[in-house]
Image: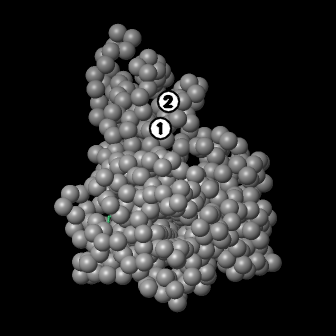
Amino acid sequence: MADVIPHNSFDTILVLDFGSQYTHLITRRLREINVYSEMLPCTQKLAELTWKPKGIILSGGPYSVYEEGSPHVDPAFFELGVPVLGICYGLQEIAHRLHADNVVAGTSREYGHADLKATRFGGHVDKLFDGLEDAMTVWMSHGDKLCNLPEGFHTIGETQNSEFAAIAHKSEPVYGIQFHPEVTHTPQGGQLLKNFAVGICGADQKWSMSEFIGREIKRIRDLVGPTGQVLGAVSGGVDSTVAGKFNPTRPGDLTEGSLDIQIVLELAKLLTEAIGDRFHAVLVDNGCMRLNECELVKDVLEKQLGINLTVVDASEEFLAGLKGENDPEKKRKFIGGKFIDVFEAEARKIEASSNGKVEWFLQGTLYPDVIESISFKGPSQTIKTHHNVGGIAERLMAGHGLKLIEPLRELFKDEVRELGRQLNISEELVGRHPFPGPGLAIRVLGEVTKEKVDMARKADHIFIGMIREAGLYNEIGQAYAALDPSRAVGVMGDKRVYANIILLRAISTKDFMTATPYPFPYEFLTKVSTRIVNEVEGVCRVAYDFTSKPPGTIEME
Ligand code: GLN
């Protein structure tokens, strides 16, 4: 079984994280060129690593190498005999460990664009710059600098401000660069990382979704054994706030790795391919789903994908519990907690009626969740080793002795989309916008009632339908209609009305961490507004939300 864990079966570049906000991008860029890569905190000891990387990258970080308490790499990594590349802090670390005076605070900080000139040796640039233009645009973000060339190294590239912007050891494969090749502002950065991983480390470019699926199916079969049963929730309902894990950079929003229906469909399909009807999917209707959502999920799972599904209609219980509750965090907590209760009760029933004991619980953890839990946040902060999206697994594991199965744990969201395509899930489902666990409950501001959810639901259906008709759906990161229960005066059919307001939100984003309002044509918004006011009873105004994130979040609550 161990042989199918990706780092045991694919050549792997290990990225040691010193806390840079871009570390995960290094991993991503490598996977984009089909080289498998994993990230571990910079405190990782070589002796505790159970596999051998093909090469090591030391990331950037917010600390200064010469300061007391700043993090340092286990020196044993330099004895492993595999190539090492230091990026920014990583470069400074390489220089500092050879001599404490090599790195100092710079007199001027350098943020943003710089022009790097690769040094020629006998007519050739260093291998790291193979195939790149001699003068390349790079992106910098540092305040410290190398003031001496470390012993045994030579300069392979310089910028106006950084005499030692790129260095290499004269006889060993150890490299350091002051700029960040992983960000898109370094246009040739991807090629540089490829030069390192493939050209210098000799890593195979074999990481692909079809390879991964074959191996993962085998791994699940081996793990679950011939009789084991697996249980999985196929609707949201739980999110990080339930576990008391509040992330101030993303309050109220999905993380890139959050569970949403699209991911869940892919997981369910993967499990069914691996173990057939020993996989039990449970869909809990919390009364706050989008129009026809439950029917759609049921139809896709049962008819199109042949998955064993139980639907539990708990909408009344959820709506009853939300009565009188105005506070967004309390609403979320209630929904998450209730979801766990309903799911647990259902799990017991399934267990009673299935042939083998349910031993496994399926969880849709994605790599960004894993990264968030292992990334190095500072010497004083404890590094979390385990993470789960909302406490449900903890309760099931403790109460029922269930073990966790997380097939997508190594994947980024875009890789999950690719996985869905390979599993023949329709493009429409694979490309769906994320949908939060608590559903429309956090898109109805304040107290949630059935009537209000209905209004938001109908307006949302019209808005999304019109976006699809206009061919804009795939350009937009997320779009929805929310209900503002304040009332405004209007005149409809010569009568005075006093009714609710619908808020439309649509954003452009790459990673959901930052976002800008989607620039719809004015006429489009006018048409949407007319239809909503005409078709949704109880609504007399429609407004478009022009707030970016930050300061706004993507969701309303
Ligand atoms: N903190 C170090 C500096 O300011 C490294 C920065 C980085 O790795 N981006 O130079």
| 355, above or below 490, in the image | below
Q: Amino acid at mark 2?
A: Phe
Disc 1 element? strand
Between residue 444 and residue 523, name the one nearer to us.
523
Q: Amino acid at mark 1?
A: Ala
Between residue 485 and residue 393, name the one nearer to us.
393
- In the rendered image, which quarter contains the N terminus? bottom right
Q: Is residue 495 left or right of residue 367?
A: left
Q: Is residue 90 left or right of residue 51?
A: left
Q: Position of residue 478 (x, y in %)?
A: 48, 41
Disc 2 element? helix
> What residue is shown with label 2?
463
Q: Residue at x 41, y 65 (%)?
A: 155
| 400, above or below 187, in the image | below
Q: Position of residue 10 (x, y in %)?
A: 68, 70
Q: Residue at x 77, y 71 (%)?
A: 218
> What residue is shown with label 1?
479
Q: Residue at x 50, y 37 (%)?
A: 476
Q: Residue at x 43, y 84 (%)?
A: 74
Q: Position of residue 129 (x, y in %)?
A: 52, 57
Q: Residues within 10 Å of mark 1 (few under 14, many from 20)?
A: many
